[in-house]
Image (cartoon, rainbow, N blue to C red):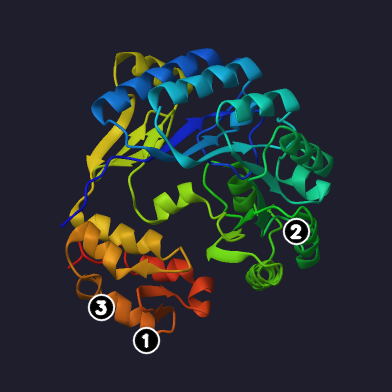
Amino acid sequence: MTINKRTEAVYIHIPFCTNKCFYCDFNSYVLKDQPVMDYLHALDQEMALTVKSNPPGIIKSIFVGGGTPTVLKPEEMKYFLQSVKRHFPEWSDDIEFSMEANPGTTDLEKLSVMRAGGVNRISFGVQAFQNKLLSGIGRIHDTDDVYRSLDNARQAGFDNMSIDLMFGLPNQTLDMLAESIDKALELGLPHYSIYSLKVEENTLFHTMYQRNQLPLPDEEDELNMYLLLMKRMKQAGYNQYEISNFAKPGFESRHNMTYWRNEDYYGLGAGAHGYVGRHRHVNIKGVNPYNEAALKGLPRLESFEVSREEAMEDFLMVGLRVLEGVDRERFQQQFGISMDEVFAAPLNKMVSAGLLDVTEEGYRLSSKGILFGNDVFAEFIGSLSAN
């Protein structure tokens, strides 16, 4: 039978940024002249309404993303974190409370407020260690800001930190990526996320790409970049626990594992997505429309029930991103039916193609499958509803 338990994970969206990066299609707005305090009050109201309609369990992970949450001033940050604690008061002893940060927006005072408010993990958007590449993708920080921000974070009492790097950037070479990996590993952090650039619609890069003005590495170079980073991270003792994520043992992102295990999470803030009790919702995106809607009720753009078939497809699709793979027993617990039975055709096809390996617990991407993950995931999209 399906197991129902109270929601234990919270995602909160702070949509403000100092500027808009050239590749970013997230729901974010340049900070200048934005009604920040009104937004934080609206967020407080949404939290109150959310926990009233769906009381939380003991919270095991909170993730604050954006935008750039660290553009909040210290007093705004303090108000926001008090709000979180008031509406989600029960935390597990080993809660993971993460906040995204941009280097250059994290002075010691703000970091101290964050630490005092319960944040215990920071994810810095570094992206590269070449200033020329950074300015070429619209980042406003430079490499000096990276080192300064990490020093400030350590002084404020943070030891659980992660940085994001990107590959496949315009004008990026294999040597540049190798240098970025060297500099990243010298920091000795417990976690690294390393993503390939995706050119998304409604971004400056998409416009440039359409005009043939975006000098991207070719497919072979991008593949070599991915192979290099997997090799280097493994040599340095990091476990690749998900397609784009590497960690020292015990430092895997618990919040992201909630997504990849298709478990429930609250989604709060402008444009945020949530998934509770097999219902998904998307919030209103614009700052002022969100603020106004939150005063009248839950600020939903849309809300819909996820069918059992779709939930099962999602389980495979997101679960296979994790390199330990999908677990038959967990599937059985969630859906009361055998995974091998439900997905016999696509699973057999992917195993025969050498893209999935059979494990004692279930299935996982093979070493070849890691390189062609999107092809594997696509096999499960609509595979049940199509029958």
Determine which residue is flagged by label 3: 345
> In the visual, does 60 lie left or right of 385?
right
Q: Mark 3 or mark 1: name the one nearer the start of the chain.
A: 3
The part of the image, by quadrant, that contains residue 384 is bottom left
Q: Quadrant of the N terminus?
A: bottom left
Point out residue 263 in the picture as x, y percentages from the top left corner.
34, 50
Determine which residue is flagged by label 2: 185
Relative to 65, say whether 314 is above or below.
below
Residue plotted at (30% across, 14% down): 296
> In the visual, does 38 lie left or right of 230?
left
Mark 2 neighbour class, 10 Å CA radius: few under 14, some 14 to 19, many 20 or more: some
Point out residue 269 in the picture as x, y percentages from the top left corner.
43, 28
Residue 382 visible in this rendered orientation of the protein: no
- Which dot, 2 or 3, sits closer to the camera? 2
Q: Which mark is residue 352?
A: 1
Residue plotted at (45% across, 17% down): 288
Identify the amino acid type marked 3: Ala
- CA distance for labels 2 and 1: 37 Å
Identify the amino acid type marked 2: Leu
Give the residue at the far bottom of this rendering.
352
Q: Nearer the viewer, residue 217 or 377?
A: 377
Point out residue 218 in the picture as x, y percentages from the top left corner.
67, 68
Q: Mark 2 or mark 3: name the one nearer the start of the chain.
A: 2
Mark 1 neighbour class, 10 Å CA radius: few under 14, some 14 to 19, many 20 or more: few
